[in-house]
Image (cartoon, rainbow, N blue to C red):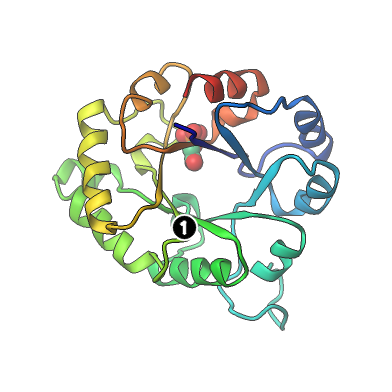
Amino acid sequence: MHKVVIANWKMNFSLNEAIDFCNHFIESSKNTLIIASPSIYLSYLSQNFPNIIFASQDVSEESYDYGAFTGEISAKMLYDLGVKYSITGHSERRINQLETNHIVKRKAVNCIKNNITPIICVGETKNVRESGHHLEYIKKQIMESIPDSSSFILAYEPIWAIGTGNTPNREELIEVFSFIENVIAKDITLVYGGSVNLQTIDIIRTVNQINGIMLGKSSLDIVKLEQIIESL
Ligand code: PGA
């Protein structure tokens, strides 16, 4: 089955490094790559690499196309650049920019209104996981963050797995992804993110409910990224 691979570059790469990366990228016939580049590079990259699918890492929660919102980038602006996806509610933004489920939902709604598919992120902290209440926690995040539509991707990214090298085991993945399928009850793409690399991919790809992956660190090395895309 065809799967999606979301390369979340976060706040990495100079423009020249980003261009170099895109110049070396070889399209896979097996799975689809989406590059979530820093927004400031999206204009240049989307014009110069029309064969690559780009995402933004964030979008304004304001529902206006234009207006007095200093520093904000609207979904309409992204759409006009040819951006097809936008990450919304990544845990780093939930933590550092204090984004609530309500804000994440507003962002997702703006994306859909502008023909951009939001990649809505959810996932529990280590404390919540250890308390055993992770399913309830994820359910609340999902119910409060998703729009009334099926035009979105849901990414489960446990915070304790991001950038740590720790990943859920196969049983834990099956538990959460089966639960998410039931909670959403719509036919949407479900993605796993958090320390996906050439080792951890072996377990992740055996879980049927997982239709794609989101990569942070592993998305910055083109050789590793291509190997992961091929092995998914
Ligand atoms: P990581 O990041 O692959 O470096 O753990 C994943 C993410 O934050 O989406």
The residue depicted at 61 percent of the width and 65 percent of the height is 115
Return the residue nearer the eye: 204 or 41.
Answer: 204
Give the residue furthest to the left: 132
The residue tagged 1 is: 152
The residue depicted at 76 percent of the width and 33 percent of the height is 22
Instruction: Give percent across and percent down for residue 140.
Output: 26, 62
In the rendered image of this protein, does residue 119 appear above or below residue 80?
above
The reply to whether residue 205 is in sight is yes
The residue depicted at 33 percent of the width and 22 percent of the height is 203
Left or right, 85 with reference to 131: right
Return the residue nearer the eye: 217 or 50.
Answer: 50
Instruction: Give percent across and percent down for residue 179.
Output: 21, 48
**Displayed quadrant of residue 16:** top right
In the image, is the residue at mark 1 within 8 Å of ligand 1 by its beta carbon? no
Question: Tag 1's secondary structure?
Answer: loop
Left or right, 11 with reference to 81: left
Instruction: Give percent across and percent down for residue 230.
Output: 55, 20
The reply to whether residue 74 is in sight is no
Rendered-image quadrant of the N terminus: top left
